[in-house]
Image: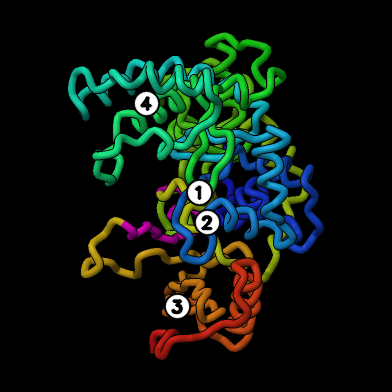
Amino acid sequence: MAILIPNDQARKIFLERQRLSDPPGRALTKAGLLQLIDDLGFVQVDSIATVERAHHMILFSRNQTYRREHLNALLEKDRELFEHWTHDASIIPARLFRYWKHRFRRREPIIAERWKKWHGEGFDAAFEETFRHIAENGAIMSRDMKVEDHKSGGWWNWHPNKTALEYYWHTGKLAIAGRVNFQKIYDLMERVIPPRHHEPEVSQEEFVDWACRSALKRLGFATSGEIAAFWDLVTPQEAKDWVTDHRDELIEVLIGSANGGKPRPSFAFVGFPENLGDIPEPPARVRVLSPFDPLLRNRDRAERLFDFFYRIEVFVPEPKRQYGYYVFPLLEGDRMIGRIDMKADRKADALDVKRLWLEKGVRPSAGRLEKLEAELLRVARFAGVDKITYQEGWRGE
């Protein structure tokens, strides 16, 4: 018989898995940062810096002593992290690189065919030239090989050498050696990823087992679809087959929904939740999350657990936006309490707060607003600005 996990307990379990129950002010060393990212699995990278880039915001929301220079050292000096794709571009522990070799093999024919359709036959003529240039001359940025008369634009208008760089990165021939003003520096994979992270080779069966097992560990409980979606490395059918083949290690659980819906049938490892020990209460403070925070990445899961509907509206035309261009979710304890539209105005040395939306049933009490302001001051300091400015009507009265 399936075990019923009440919604409040399920939320706390997932928050603990997401390292959002840790004391946010405890000193975080460089080794601690590597462990944090390993526990999360990956941290999504995004270029939008309305307040600060997504990866920095994700890490800061978990620990306010996080230092950017530690992340840069782990990526570009120690090579204990690397950049590649999960569901999107992400920072990943380099010890997992050997599993990504399976992704490279799987994706290469798919990407080759897709890009051929984008750009037509013969567009890949620059590929060999680009790869040879890097092999002989060292790391480059895409602008180093840009054709003089090429017009810039989005990915649909990449010049051939940029396409070659991305193709070789996606298929594991090149790696990201670093960034300058967020622009990628490409080099040969073997010159970026240390040999210790290439071995031992893993079989197809070992790869699928690792992908499913490690995903379920980080999720705490999940459906087979959620297991497949976590790393985006295996297919839904492979995850479903893995669950079937490992039923002796798994138990069925029913996860209570925050919105009053039917409990969600899911799977967990045998011993769950007793083997988790005492699930800590998350800090009561208000915290600003990145729009790309892994707590909310699976929107359906987040809606069931937190009764919080969230979508990024960057690509929604302004007149059709419900909230704003880049609106930050707000977490208080184990509840999602709202969202806030704000921007770091570095010329004015201020965090400019445009609008706050609280969820239904969440009161703008004096105590809650004090906690929000304390968090905004922390975020402002992290973003490198000195004060907070509130636009007229920011509370939506």
Q: CA distance from mark 3 to mark 2?
A: 21 Å
The residue wearing badge 1 is 182
Q: Is residue 38 magenta?
A: no
Comparing marks 2 and 1, which lies closer to the viewer? Answer: 1
Where are the magenta residues, as a range? Answer: 300-314
Image x and y of residue 47, in percent: 46, 52
Q: Earlier in the sequence, mark 2 or mark 1?
A: 2
Q: Which mark is residue 164?
A: 4
Image x and y of residue 14, in percent: 60, 48
- The answer to whether one can see residue 302 in this image is no
Q: Is residue 309 magenta?
A: yes
Q: Earlier in the sequence, mark 4 or mark 3?
A: 4
Q: Earlier in the sequence, mark 1 or mark 3?
A: 1
**Residue at 58% from the left image edge and 47% from the top image edge:** 5
Residue type at tag 4: Ala
Badge 4 vs badge 1, beta-carbon distance below 8 Å: no
The residue wearing badge 3 is 356
Q: Earlier in the sequence, mark 4 or mark 1?
A: 4
